[in-house]
Structure formats: C-alpha cells, structure tokens
Amino acid sequence: MYTPSDFPPFAVTVDLVVLTVRADALCALLVRRGEAPFRGRWALPGGFVQVAESVDAAAARELVEETGVSGLFLEQLATYGEPRRDPRMRVVSVAYLALAPDLPVPVAGSDAASAAWVPVSEVSSLAFDHSRILADGVERARAKLEYTGLGTEFCGVEFTVAELRRVYEIVWGVGLDPRNFHRKVTGVEGFLVPTGGSTSRDGGRPAALYRRGDVGVLSPPLVRSSA
Amino acid sequence: MYTPSDFPPFAVTVDLVVLTVRADALCALLVRRGEAPFRGRWALPGGFVQVAESVDAAAARELVEETGVSGLFLEQLATYGEPRRDPRMRVVSVAYLALAPDLPVPVAGSDAASAAWVPVSEVSSLAFDHSRILADGVERARAKLEYTGLGTEFCGVEFTVAELRRVYEIVWGVGLDPRNFHRKVTGVEGFLVPTGGSTSRDGGRPAALYRRGDVGVLSPPLVRSSA
DNA sequence: CCAAAAGTGTTGGGGGTACACCCATGT
DNA sequence: ACATGGGTGTACCCCCAACACTTTTGG
C-alpha cells in the first residue's frame, strides 16, 4: 500500500548552532539571509540534506563549509518539525551543536560576506524558529560543560588552565576560584595533557601549557556554583 | 531558485521507545511487522508524520494509539537519517522516548494483536536500525533517572517509597539501600507528595503512599553507585 | 622591590554510605 | 511471638569551597 497520502513530501534540512568564546563573550555563528523569506534577517547556518548523504554527514559538511575548519566537535541537538516553521513548504530541520575555538577568520564559506560571530546576549530575533534553536543549543552547551571535558573545545591546541577557566566563566556567566579550578581540572585523570611548555602571555608567573585529553565524561563533574 | 535537486523528497516518521517496569524487568513496547520489509520481525511502534501535524504531535498521537493512554511522559530522543536505513525509500525518523506505568492491557492500538511488552534484556535484533534506537532510549532513560524525578513516571498514581526504589533498582540493575533511598527521596523538596494514605500490600509495616511531585531536576541527584 | 598571576597546603562543613536500631502490621 | 518490611538516628568518611601562603615572572 504505497498510497501517496501515506508519504507526504518533506524537505529535510540541518541547522547549525556553532558556538565559540571570543572577546570575553559566548558567540554564535550567524549568517544574514540573502533571499526571501526573512531576507536580510540573521539566521543559523544550514542547508538541505542531499539524497545520498546521511543527516549527520550533511551537518558535518555544512560545518566545514561555514567555518573552513574540520574536526570540530559536533553533535545532534534536536529536531524541529512544526508544520509552518517555514512559510514556503513543509520543512523538518535537524539541529546540531558545534563548539569551535576562536577561529582567526570569521567565516570562509560560500556566503562569506554575510556571516559573523555575534555574542549570544546580543542576538535578537532570528529567522524561522532559529531563536529557539539557538537558545536550546546554548543551554545544551552550558550543561555539557559540567559533566564532560568539552570546555577544551573552545580553546586552541595549547592552552593554560587560566584560559580554560575563562571559558567556563564566560559560558556559565559566573566567577570561579582560580586555585580550586586549577586543582580540579589537573586532578581529573586524562582531562588535560601537559605539553611541557609554558607561557607568560597572561602576565605574571608563566603558566604550564596543556593539550586536550581524551576524557569523555568528567567524574567528578565540574559544578557551576559560586558567583 | 526552487530547483528540484535542492529539495530531495524525504519521508519523515516517528519511532517510539516506550519503556515500562513490569515483572521485575525493564520492558519495551514492540510490535511485530505485518508487511515487508522485515515482515514478522519485531520493531518499535511508529508511523508517518502527517502533513498538517507537527512531529511532536505525531509522536503523541502514535503513543496514544499504541498504549491507549494519554498524558504519558514523552520527549524527543534523537533523529536517525542514514540513507539506506529503510530499503524502500529515503526515510528520516525522529525517535521519542516515553515512560509508562505498568499498563493493565498490554496494548490497545490498531495492531493490537501483534504488540507486546518485551524485557529489554531479551530483545534480539529488531527491524531497520531499531536496535540502536532502543539502546539509545534505554541509556537515556537510565541517565534521566539520575538527575530528574522521572522514576515516578513508571509508577501508578499512588505508590510507596519501596515501589519507587524497585523501579530504580530494575532500571539501573543495582541494589540500593532501602533506608538511605527513603531518606533521599523524601528529603528532596517537591519530589514526592504524601497522600496521607498507607498500604501494606508489600507486607510488613504499612508504607505511606505518595503522589508524583512537580519537581523537574533533582538536586542533589540520585546516584547509581552501590551494587 | 612590587605587582600579578601560577600553583600548593590546610581547614571546616555538608552530604553520602553503612549500619544499628525502633515501629507497625500479618500470621 | 516472630517474621517482614517501614522508617529514624548516628558515626565515619570523602569531597569540596574558602582562603592563607609560596613561587616565578615582568616592570
């Protein structure tokens, strides 16, 4: 029974919530739309899933196209499927969350001229239901920083404990005790790998440099408590 | 530019991971397929999203059709979109996790005759990629029990602390200290609401009866530690 | 020498585990 | 009386927030 009514036609897209920490703020990658609907409005980067590729692969492809960098953290966030979320046709969108370090070039994609990093606190109303998707992504990122080692995804290949701490403080919007934070992150087995090098780029006594470890979940988790 | 190649046609379905606790086991609701492909194999209940309904609404509709009960906990799990997951055509499926109490009738849906509660430990290979979806759902349920009050979703409207503890022990597969568990769950503000009644259906001294509270996240969380 | 930032040591309190102990019912 | 499970009290332990203190650089 392959009656057409059983298989209503859908378009499937991926939308990306790409977050980074730069200029003391949590920023999202946004593109300015060049076509109707919502022409001229900010939106999340994304695009249609091709026939032969998986949805995950489509998200990875779009991420490389938009950031020019591969190997970034990328995970599925949620799927948004309200009937009228796109006024043109029935579109179901699978949203992904990506975390990126402070990339040198804002964007090097196909729509390079119209893309920018925007602090999430300054984002007003986006096209479609992208405001809600962005909010969901930010909340997911905040939560994941507590019990996974993903804070390092916001840093470069080598970083100091203080730089990592700034990431947590900015993403969570809280102050953290530098001494206890240092003890905590260096104490978790496999979280940070010392490179042997050190730097004094932050002033004061030189700080040891670390690379990202391969830990998945942190135990015990970091907790966002003090103000 | 509405070229057809930009909008490859997809079918969108919802698949349900419906879990319950019965007969000292964590069980999933499965249906036996009556048509090809995978005719005769067990599969997750689900169906096509209709043109005018949201994806979430489709999941809720299917859940009522399959269980005969409304108001159950239901949340999005993940979306599965490999190109060849359905041999007939390109299907993207949005999976949902639902938690149900031990329902009196196994199933009262359209395919009632071919549905059953199956202990997850005895589930072998399901149709499509449903084995993986089920595994993801079970893992999500186990995790959610730690930091939310969702364990009560497996109980009836009124339940004792011991009955709730059995739920946690079965879902997690561990033993829990009855005294500490009692202190913990009754100590979390808003988790359990005493009804004033009591029952001795479990034998021994009568136990106080509780209703589900309206707490979202548990702090401190319950932890699955001891064996 | 002084400021600034990196690390280390110490202490006190909260919460969790383990377990002894009492309570209330059925048989 | 005794078995069975409900519920409370308590001691110990570990973790962690708070903060004093030392270390190492730049100016």
Image: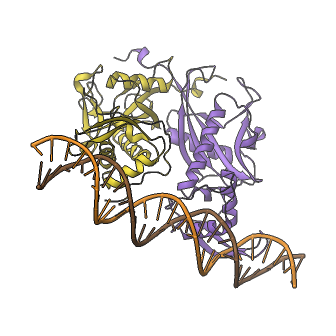
Chain colours: A purple, B yellow, C orange, D brown
Quarter occupied by residue B130:
top left
Q: Position of residue B82 (x, y in %)?
A: 45, 38
* Residue pictured at 60% horizontal, 43% vertical: A139
Q: Is residue B103 above or below residue A144?
A: above
Please state if B189 lies on the left or on the right of A166 as rendered: left
Q: How many marks?
A: 0
* Residue pictured at 46% horizontal, 44% vertical: B148
Q: Position of residue A92 (x, y in %)?
A: 54, 28
Please state if D22 lies on the left or on the right of A136 as rendered: right
As rendered, which of A34 and B155 lies closer to the eye? Answer: B155
Q: Position of residue A119 (x, y in %)?
A: 74, 44
* Residue pictured at 42% horizontal, 44% vertical: B140
Q: Is residue A63 above or below residue B107?
A: below
Q: Position of residue B187 (x, y in %)?
A: 44, 48
Residue A165 visible (yes or no): yes
Quarter occupied by residue A165:
bottom right
Please state if D5 lies on the left or on the right of C9 as rendered: left
- Quadrant, the N terminus of chain B: top right
Q: Is residue A40 above or below residue A27?
A: above
Please state if A10 lies on the left or on the right of B20 as rendered: right
- Quadrant, the C terminus of chain B: bottom left
Quarter occupied by residue B162:
top left
As rendered, which of B30 and B85 lies closer to the eye? Answer: B30
As rendered, which of A203 and D2 lies closer to the eye? Answer: D2
Residue B128 visible (yes or no): no
